[in-house]
Amino acid sequence: MYLSKEAKAEIFAKHGKSATDTGSTEGQVALFTTRIAHLTGHLKKNKHDFSTQLSLQKLVGKRRGLLAYLYKKDIERYRAIIKALQLRDIIK
């Protein structure tokens, strides 16, 4: 896979509570954002890869759902992760 264990641990350490806390919402959003960026780059080269396009759409939906949950639960954590990952504010 394109992400090694060390790379994932680094993502979770930076955005989650610790490197081993893989279930935190912020860590999951950061991991999904990394995967979305990777798949977007792949689709720029391979425009007719429709299975990857479907996977990308599902992943974006999962990230959006997690961000909506975080928005409802704790808006300060939501704003912090949006700013850290440089995402648009998708919850209105």
Image: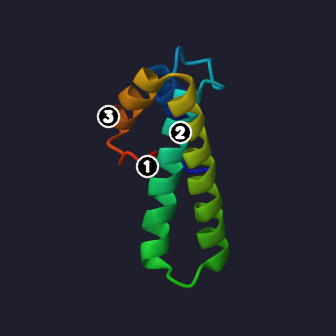
Name the foreground residue: 13 vs 58.
Answer: 58
Colouring rule applied to residues: rainbow
User: Which picture quadrant has residue 5?
Assistant: top right
Residue furthest to the top: 18
Residue placed at 46% from the left, 45% from the top?
A: 91
Residue 19 place in picture, x, y as percent: 55, 18
In-image side of 45 versus 6 (left or right): left
For mark 1, give the secondary structure: loop
Tell me if mark 1 has few (under 14), some (14-19) or many (20+) residues whose alpha carbon lies within 10 angstroms of its own: few
Three-letter residue code for mark 3: Lys
Residue placed at 62% from the left, 18% from the top?
A: 21
User: Which picture quadrant has residue 61?
Assistant: bottom right
Asked if the residue at tag 2 contacts the one at tag 1, i.e. Cβ–Cβ closer than 8 Å, the answer is: yes
C-alpha gap between disc 1 and disc 3: 12 Å
Name the foreground residue: 39 vs 86.
Answer: 86
Image mark for residue 67: 2
Name the foreground residue: 46 vs 27.
Answer: 27
* Sequence-first tag of 2 and 3: 2
> Which residue is labeled 3 in the image?
83
Residue 6 appearing in the image: no
Residue furthest to the bottom: 48
C-alpha gap between disc 1 and disc 2: 8 Å
> Which residue is labeled 1 in the image?
90
Residue placed at 42% from the left, 74% from the top?
A: 44
For mark 3, give the secondary structure: helix
